[in-house]
Image: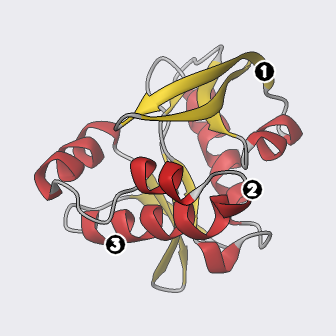
Amino acid sequence: MYQIRPYQPGEEPLLRELFYNTVHHVNQRDYTPAQRNAWAPAQYDENAWAMRMLESEPFVALDNDTIVGFADVQNDGYIDFFFCHHAYQGKGVGKALMQHILKTGKRYGVKRFYANVSLTAKPFFQHYGFTVLTEQQKQVRSVVLTNFLMEKR
């Protein structure tokens, strides 16, 4: 249904916009405006974001030519990014990305997948067999956010 491919250099602004809109629309039921602004501020360092994308090498989910989600998995099984477009929630984007991550990780011999998961995404990750190791209070730009260290073996 959705095409999954490696992100391409030059798509960083599109991924940043998707990240920003997802945090501010989808996560509003679990995080305050101050928390969402700390997590995804309107102003950001474009070069730092571009470097994070180059280093994490995310996959993008496409609906025709529109990027509707992105996620990554590192060699050690760490999932740093997992974001689905706010207008595509519940439409299979996350499922497609998660299946791709798990398949890719298996190919590289990953035995343990883990991520710092938001309150909003916790049920989704649990659905795919992730368990909570610990609840965390993370300070981001002097604002405290709750998330969960979760893993799947």
Viewport quadrant of the N terminus: bottom right
Residue under label 1, please give it: 132
Local SS, label 1: strand
Q: Give the residue at mark 3.
A: 14
Q: Residue at x 66, y 65 (%)?
A: 26
Q: Residues within 10 Å of mark 3 (few under 14, many from 20)?
A: few
Look at 54% across and 22% down and name the residue there.
Answer: 77
| Farthest residue, direction left | 47
Is residue 132 in view?
Answer: yes
The earlier-in-sequence mark between 3 and 2 is 3
N-terminal of the pair, mark 1 or mark 3, is 3
Say whether marks 3 and 2 touch (CB < 8 Å): no
Q: How many marks?
A: 3
Label 3, label 2: how far apart the Cα atoms are: 21 Å
How far, Cα to Cα, is label 1 from label 3?
A: 31 Å
Q: Is residue 22 left or right of residue 143?
A: right
Q: Which mark is residue 6?
A: none
Select label 3 or label 2 by which is in front.
3
Q: Give the residue at x 54% y 66%.
A: 24
Q: Nearer the viewer, residue 78 or 34?
A: 34
* Residue ID for mark 2: 95
Position of residue 17 measured from the top left corner of the image (x, y, whole percent): 38, 71
- Distance Cα–Cα, label 2 vs label 1: 19 Å
Q: Residue furthest bottom?
A: 64
Mark 2 or mark 1: whose residue is earlier in sequence: 2
Closer to the camera in the image, 60 or 26: 26
Residue 28 position, x and y percent, is 65, 62
Tell me the element at label 3: helix
Residue occupying image coordinates x 84% and y 43%: 123
Disc number lying in front (1 or 3) = 1
Q: In the picture, which quadrant includes the C terminus? A: top right
